[in-house]
Amino acid sequence: MHKKRPASFYCLASLFGLFVLFLYGPISAIVILSFQGPNGGLTFPMNGFSIHWFFALFGEQLVGDFETSFLRSLQLGLVVMALTVVISLVTGLAFRKKFFGSNLLFYTTVASLIVPSILVSLGIGLIFNIMGWEVSWTTSGLGAHLTWTLPFGFLIMIAVFNRFDKSYEEAARDLGASNWQTIRHVVLPIIGPSLIGVALFGFTLSYDEFARTLMTSGVKNTLPLEIFGMTTNVTTPTLYALGTLTTFFSLLMILTAMGVLFYLRRRQESHGSDAGKGV
Amino acid sequence: MNRQSPLSTLLQISPISLILGFFLVLPIGTILIVSFWDYNDFSFFPDFVWTNYSDALGSNVTYKTYLNTFWYAGLTWLCTFLVGFTVAYFLAFHIHTTRWQIVLFLICTIPFWTSNIIRMISWIPFLGRNGVFNTMLQSIGLIDEPLEFLLFSDFSIVLAFVHLYALFMVVPIFNSMMRIDRSLIEAAIDGGANGWQMLTNVVIPLCKPGIAIGSIFVVTLVMGDYITVRLMGGGQRASVGVMMWNEISLLLYPAAAAHAVVLLAVVLIMVSLMMRVVDLKKEL
């Protein structure tokens, strides 16, 4: 059954198209310009076509320490991701019932999202300074990232458990499952896809985090700090080459997450209901 | 019927409590304390002085900087609201299959998961003196000289903010819209409302919580921003974040801390005003 679309549909659809162009246009320009010829500059027109600037990233040149800062951000992102998933999950489990201080913890977590990042950065920097500890991306940097990723993971888990049908758990318990068995075989499979979402948030938010890392990563830069440093002293398309590479890496992570989601859903559909099959 | 013991609840909430306690609550407490400390050219040390606050609040520069930051926040809010509402409305009311809603929603979301700094840099080839816009406008004869205000200006700053944060408006407003009972809209139309009346009397009032949540995100992100103003303003524009960062890089920590406390107070007041429209727990 097809209804005729109203005129407003086409008007809004073209506005939506403009919005998508607005979102993707600039980054596409960066990708194209990163393939500038060796004599090309930071703007159009293209002066030839080459992968010169990508090689420049890896050579021994004055373009900063791209490789090690990438590895740092990758490791930090993976650790933050794992911690965000586990901690958000257990906190979400606890929040399924009221407990003393639950409101305080809820609003503190929300506050972590709202407090300007520069305050988190400054505050952690001050503590380490006063205590005479050395700030480092593995300690203060990790903590600063968690203040940014945990609220996202936490709020997603709260939303997930608000929609969670508790009768599945009750059924499992009625059949004699222990607490752990209920979580392992009933709760986790159902909320699995949301955990992939939390993992994606955890990794990408950490991998791209700048403001909270600024005063907390110490002398060793993460990738976003390195890129920011490059913006002030690199005037060649190397900058765009780096932008292209890290954006493709982010896209790869997003596609991986979506692939896993798709796989989980397919598996759930094929294994879905074995009710009445005597399994 | 919950068999969970208080002990296991305590175990479950302790990781997040410890992390936020040490890396959020304690740092803010430290900022509050250090804002009363004194400093000289070499170091800062415990004391109890009000000079950091009197310096911060007694200076015209502070007020000008705040005005400027409010200006960015207001403009960004208005633009992200208009864009976010339109996009959310299109997705919620004009796309009728869930599959397409998910696809289009993801298309809007993907850039959010990529680097903010790269997304800012990506405007440079468009806005510069020899950028795409100037070349285009000149070639169609609309202007003779390249427009200078496009890059490193208030314009480029707000443009970048809208580009970065529009999604924070789209998602909560879309969420609110999807909860609107469609029969209310039919009822409004059956009752003789035209499209505009339906929008202003039914959709917008029911979207208020979503609008409030989106506004909280956008306003707090802009108020505390340092990097966008620094990068897109070419180092020539002021905001509260930039002002604080300048003090931090000069190691004037107590002065920066006093500014931080003032900023936190301002942001909290703005947030609490916006929170009046919304019960956060019901929105999840």
Image (tube, coloured by chain):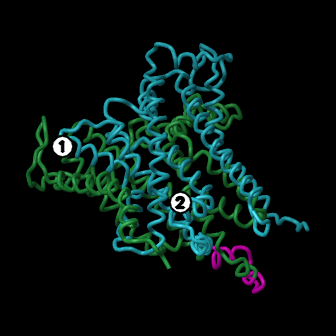
Chain colours: A cyan, B green
Q: Which chain hosts label 1? A: A
Residues in magenta, as a range: B187-203
Report the residue at 47% width, 53% height from top. A86
Q: Is residue B119 above or below residue B193?
A: above
Majority secondary structure in the magenta region: helix
User: Viewer-proximal residue, B175 or A25?
Assistant: B175
Pointer 2 and pointer 1 on the same chain: no
| Outermost residue toward the right in this view | A1
Which amino acid, mark 2?
A: Leu
Name the image quarter holding residue A216.
Answer: top left
Q: Is A81 situated left or right of A39 in this image?
A: left
Report the residue at 12% width, 56% height from top. B50
| Quarter of the image that includes the C terminus of chain A | bottom right
Which amino acid, mark 1?
A: Met
**Is residue A23 rendered magenta in the image?**
no
Q: Percent x, y for residue B131?
A: 60, 31
Q: Which mark is residue A131?
A: 1
User: Viewer-proximal residue, A156 or B187?
Assistant: A156
User: Viewer-proximal residue, B141 or A212?
Assistant: A212
Q: Percent x, y for residue A74?
A: 49, 35
- Label pair 2/1, CB-CB below 8 angstroms: no
Q: Nearer the viewer, mark 2 or mark 1?
A: 1
Observer able to see residue B100: no
**Is residue B192 rendered magenta in the image?**
yes
Q: Which mark is residue B78?
A: 2
Report the residue at 18% width, 52% height from top. B35
